[in-house]
Image (cartoon, rainbow, N blue to C red):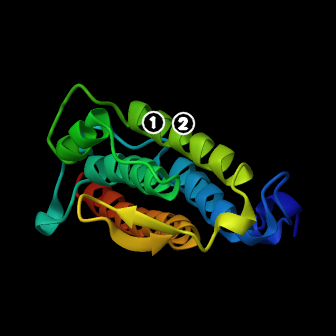
Amino acid sequence: MPKNNLEVWLRGPLPDVPPLLQPIAHALFQAQEELHEYLSDFPKNLLWQRPADVASVAFHLQHLTGVLDRIFTYARGESLSEIQMYNLKAEGVENTEITVQQLIEDFNKQIEKAIFQLKNTNEATLTEVRGVGRAQIPSTVIGLLFHAAEHTTRHLGQLLVTSKIVKQSII
């Protein structure tokens, strides 16, 4: 089997990513690859469809980007900005001006930022406590980073199922 047909985690270590953060980077890159593979030709008119009242493909794409941004912000020990709060409130609010490619590009940019942060995360800080949200619920740097990857894969799965269902509805 050619190396490029292997899942990301089987392709070996990613350059400059600390060893303990490799699984997080692998998961994020895997999600990115699958998103590109399955949504490259997704019709814009289906972005906001909600079969059986589940979340739309557009919501999942916005949420994937937003969660990475927010959770990685908490991992840095920072509070959310006004722009991040605005984007959170806008997730899932229908906007017919948004395109599939725009949402994918937003996700790509966020993956790039996340990988940059992983590369610059000192492994000695992974068990440091970080507060989440206004209530400052305690977590750790590695807990937040792992959750961001786990949450990304969970929503990607939901997105892929929803996209398949709404595409089948037009056949």
Q: Is residue 118 above or below residue 7?
A: above
Q: Position of residue 138 (x, y in %)?
A: 39, 73
Q: Residue at x 16, y 63 (%)?
A: 51
Q: Position of residue 47 (x, y in %)?
A: 26, 44
- Which of the image's four quarters has the N terminus? bottom right
Q: Is residue 36 above or below residue 128?
A: above
Q: Residue at x 52, y 73 (%)?
A: 143
Of all residues, the one furthest to the top in this rendering is 97
Q: Which of the 4 image quadrants contains residue 17?
A: bottom right
Q: Is residue 154 left or right of residue 93?
A: right
Pointer 2 residue: 109
Q: Gap in Å between the C-alphas at discs 2 and 1?
A: 5 Å
Of all residues, the one furthest to the left in this rendering is 53
- Which of the image's four quarters has the C terminus? bottom left
Q: Nearer the viewer, residue 150 or 159?
A: 150
Q: Residue at x 67, y 60 (%)?
A: 25
Q: Which of the 4 image quadrants contains residue 97?
A: top left
Q: Amino acid at mark 2?
A: Lys
Q: Residue at x 22, y 58 (%)?
A: 169
Residues at circles 2 and 1 in contact by the CB criterion of under 8 Å: yes
Q: Position of residue 42 (x, y in %)?
A: 39, 44
Q: Amino acid at mark 1?
A: Asp
Pointer 1 residue: 106
Q: Nearer the viewer, residue 57 or 42?
A: 57
Q: Is residue 7 visible?
A: no
Q: Is residue 85 visible?
A: yes
